[in-house]
Image (tube, grey):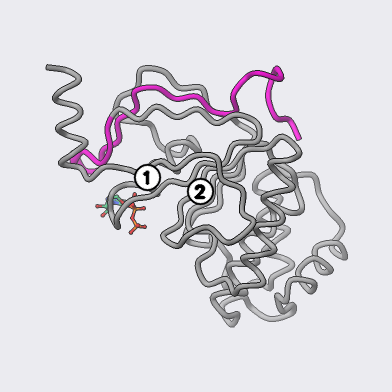
């Protein structure tokens, strides 16, 4: 895992970030630093901009304004939508997910063993899998290809208790090895899931007030 250029360098350090969608302010003046071993739980009501923030941290869109941005490139971004090819089977999907992310190629047997161990059926189009099976498949790259920073949008959605617990164990090992995590979840984090900080996004009205105060 390429965690950082130096032991003390944060994985992520953003200052004064503002996020908008369609000209509407979502959140304002966010400062966020994620260091090795940190886990940040982003919270807030539906539509307040949690996904937009994570996508921005992943470099998939730009903040509307920023004082400074230092983003980690060694990232797994696992969105709320699973980004699967519906007509391919789970093993091919997993190979694609790893390949698109330029992760080192793994033998097909390793991918199949991982999926079977997590109860993800092989040999049928993934459009026929259950919601939880599809979610397990989408999260599989986390275990198979180390990346310094995980950006996870509602990772527990559709997962059963055992799968939530397995993800908590994986996350604990990840941060113990020097990784960091920023995640959203409407549910409380499962027992054993590491946590060092909560970031609660304001409603856009509150963010607008904050922004006005800052610049008045
Ligand atoms: N691709 C898009 N184009 C235009 N507007 C969008 C797009 N995606 C999201 N929005 C809008 O941006 C706002 C923030 O959406 P976002 O998905 O970031 O919220 P969220 O906090 O993650 O919500 P939820 O808890 O429901 O998942 C919402 O008002 C949403 O309608």
Q: Earlier in the sequence, mark 1 or mark 2?
A: 1
Is residue 152 rendered to the left or right of residue 69?
right
The numbered dot on residue 144 is none
| Helix, strand or loop under label 1 | helix
The residues tagged by marks 1 and 2 sit, at their Cα atoms, a distance apart of 12 Å
Q: Quick check: marks 1 and 2 in contact, CB under 8 Å? A: no
For the point 48% across and 35% down, the residue is: 59
Q: Is residue 162 above or below residue 145?
A: below
76 and 192: which is toward the camera:
192
Quadrant in which the N terminus is drawn: top right
Q: Position of residue 103 (x, y in %)?
A: 74, 44
For the point 21% across and 36% down, the residue is: 207
Q: Is residue 10 magenta?
A: yes
Quadrant in which the C terminus is drawn: top left
For the point 30% across and 27% down, the residue is: 29
Q: Is residue 130 above or below residue 106?
A: below
For the point 69% across and 49% down, the residue is: 172
Q: Position of residue 114 (x, y in %)?
A: 80, 65
The picture quadrant where one finds residue 180 is top right
The local crowd at label 2, few if under 14, some if 14 to 19, many if 20 or more residues have their Cα within 10 Å, is: many
Q: Is residue 197 above or below residue 9?
A: below
Q: Which residues are magenta?
A: 1-28
| Helix, strand or loop under label 2 | strand
Q: Position of residue 84 (x, y in %)?
A: 57, 64
The numbered dot on residue 52 is 1
Disc 2: which residue: 183
Q: Is residue 29 magenta?
A: no
Determine if the C-beta at disc 1 is less than 8 A from ligand 1. Answer: yes
44 and 110: which is toward the camera:
44
Disc number lying in front (1 or 2): 2
The reply to whether residue 158 is visible in this rendering is yes
């Amino acid at each position: 895992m390429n965690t950082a250029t130096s032991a003390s360098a944060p994985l992520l350090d953003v200052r004064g970030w503002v996020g908008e969608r369609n000209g509407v302010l979502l959140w304002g003046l966010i400062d966020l630093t994620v260091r090795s071993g940190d886990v940040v739980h982003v919270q807030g009501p539906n539509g307040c901009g949690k996904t937009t923030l994570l996508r921005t941290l992943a470099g998939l869109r730009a903040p509307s304004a920023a004082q400074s941005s230092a983003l980690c490139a060694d990232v797994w971004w696992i969105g709320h939508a699973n980004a699967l090819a519906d007509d391919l089977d789970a093993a091919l999907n997993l190979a694609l997910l790893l390949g698109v992310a330029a992760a080192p190629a793994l033998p097909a047997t390793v991918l199949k063993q991982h999926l079977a161990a997590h109860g993800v059926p092989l040999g049928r189009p993934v459009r026929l899998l259950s919601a939880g099976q599809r979610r397990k498949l989408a999260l599989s790259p986390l275990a198979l290809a180390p990346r310094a920073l995980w950006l996870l949008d509602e990772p527990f959605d559709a997962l059963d208790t055992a799968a939530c617990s397995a993800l908590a164990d994986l996350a604990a090992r990840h941060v113990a090895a020097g990784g960091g995590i920023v995640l959203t979840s409407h549910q409380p984090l499962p027992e054993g899931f590491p946590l060092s900080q909560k970031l609660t996004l304001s409603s856009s009205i509150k963010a607008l007030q904050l922004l006005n105060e800052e610049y008045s």
